[in-house]
Amino acid sequence: MAEIKARVHSLESFGTVDGPGVRMVVFMQGCPMRCLYCHNPDTWGIEGGTEMTVDEILAQYDRNVSFYKRGGITVTGGEPLLQMDFVIELYPILGFGNRLDLHRFQSSGIRKYYFSFESNYE
């Protein structure tokens, strides 16, 4: 099976506003919403960012894991579910206590996985 890669806009190693505790924040690249007051319009284009694997994200997390004991990882964006296969691969590895910030991007395929994902891992 091929390793899944995602386009990641950036990583924040010491996030304090994207969930409880100190967190690593993964900003995914790409969002079709174009919200008027978006805080991250530089994440809109799907072609930007850096390709990363789940293992690369976890290696970054492991560098500072002692700071994340009461926190975890938040995946936000952009719209994380534009790269749904990557998010689905990442979250079971992380376990509970991690967050997925969505922007209610609705398409039949994404809605199907969103509810399945939420009911299994939230």
Image (cartoon, grey):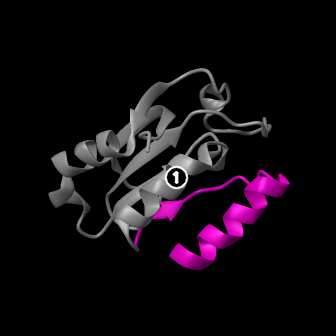
Residue 108 vs residue 78: left or right? right
How many numbered marks does the figure carry? 1
Q: What stretch is highlighted in magenta?
A: 97-122
Residue 70 x %, y %: 28, 70
Residue 17 visible, this orientation: no
Residue at 15%, 59% in the rendered image: 66
Residue 24 vs residue 41: left or right? left
- Placement of the C terminus among the 4 image quadrants: bottom right
Magenta span has 12?
no
Query: Disc 1 residue type?
Result: Val
Residue 58 vs residue 51: left or right? left
In this view of the protein, which residue sits in the foreground, 71 or 46? 46
Kindly give the residue lying farthest to the front in the view shown: 1
Kindly give the residue lying farthest to the top in the view shown: 47
Magenta span has 121?
yes
Residue at 67%, 30% in the rendered image: 44
Residue 66 visible, this orientation: yes
In this view of the protein, which residue sits in the foreground, 7 or 63? 7
Residue that numbered label 1 is attached to? 87
Residue 2 x %, y %: 44, 39
Residue 41 vs residue 16: left or right? right
Residue at 62%, 78% in the rendered image: 119
Q: How crowded is mark 1: few (under 14 residues within 10 Å), some or many (20 or more)?
A: some
Which quadrant of the view contains residue 96? bottom left
Which quadrant of the view contains residue 50? top left
Secondary-structure class at tag 1: helix
The relative height of residue 95 versus residue 41 in the rendered view (above or below) is below
In this view of the protein, which residue sits in the foreground, 70 or 84? 84
Residue 47 x %, y %: 61, 21
- Placement of the N terminus among the 4 image quadrants: top left
Residue 102 x %, y %: 65, 55
